[in-house]
Amino acid sequence: MTQIANDKPARAAGSAPAGSVVGGGLLLAVISATTFGLSGPLASGLLTAGWSPGAIVLCRMTVAALALAPFTIATLRGRWHLVARQKGQILVYGVLAVAGAQFCYFSAVATMDVAPALLIEYTAPAAVVAWMWLRHGQRPARLTVLGAVVAAAGLVLVLDLTSGAHVAWSGVAWALAAMIGATAYFLISADTGTGLPPLALAGLGLTVGSLTLGALAATGLLPMHGVTTPVTFAVGSPPWWVPLLLLGLVTAALAYATGIAASRRLGSRVASFVALLEVVAAVVFAWLLVDQLPGLMQLAGGLLIVGGVVAVKLGDRRIA
């Protein structure tokens, strides 16, 4: 993998000014985090209805891969030699960062509360900072460390862990596995040395992930079961295929494409911390879909997360 985990915003001759690149990257990162945040509440409804985590993830990735296929082909414009040259990275991205992260997160949600599962998975930004330090010698600035601490404190408040949420050890293990996949997602997404357009990487990764889970399902190693009854949410009971389409088109195709594009502009460290906003989005969507109204402590936690992201960005500017 060339230039893996690049943490510098992309700069090219004749490109847009740095400010517009970063501003556009932040907008894309917020869109990605918001759409990713919708996945948990949607999947929770399907799990309650009787769907297995494997079936949800396979349907989600297949729909997303099919939706992005025309864009993947168009952005490559016949440059299939890039796919051959980066086949190892694409394989790792599809299996670990896409299929692995999604399946492990939904498996965690099936065995423990959503809040602690998200908190464990979103230790990934700290893992990104540690990787950049240990592997590439990019020592984090004090503001970056402070931002990590502030954001972690905000997560505790947003997830309302002080109320005594139940934590199952099997769920913890799944959530930790999801954290590894999320870390790989941020690191590989920020690699600007592959030559692969963001849409191409997203589409190819989702295709590899779909084929991987499909093979596991065909061999019987991955349980697959679903139902065709309506799925109950606070806003109504839509047909089973509605949340599956939303999972595939919005929380996967759109979320991955914008997330990769954001990482290319912001670098893995900053993009991973902005992605913490997914937790805030998940709380809001949980309120709308399953009637869980966030309290004042959770709102205060959201402000801390935003403050932590700002501190990380300011600290990132001090890195040579």
Image (cartoon, helix red, strand yellow):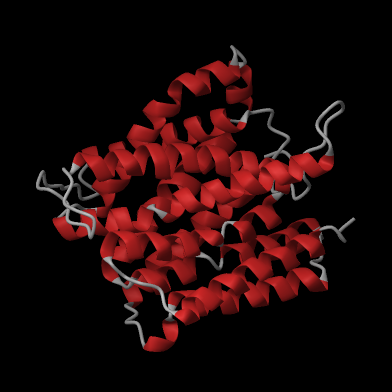
Q: Is residue 304 left or right of residue 103?
A: right
What x and y, as percent, mark residue 280? 49, 64
Q: How many marks?
A: 0
Determine which quarter of the picture holds residue 195.
top right
Q: Between 163 and 108, which is closer to the camera in this rendering?
A: 163
Relative to 261, say whether 174 is above or below.
below
What x and y, as percent, mark residue 122? 52, 65
Q: Is residue 2 left or right of residue 287?
A: right
Q: Between 183 and 296, which is closer to the camera in this rendering?
A: 296
Name which residue lies at 78% across and 56% down: 136
Q: Is residue 110 visible?
A: yes
Determine which quarter of the picture holds residue 208.
top left
Q: Is residue 219 left or right of residue 112?
A: left
Name which residue lies at 48% across and 71% down: 119
What x and y, as percent, mark residue 223? 20, 50
Residue with the most extreme left position:
229
Name which residue lies at 58% across and 24% down: 83
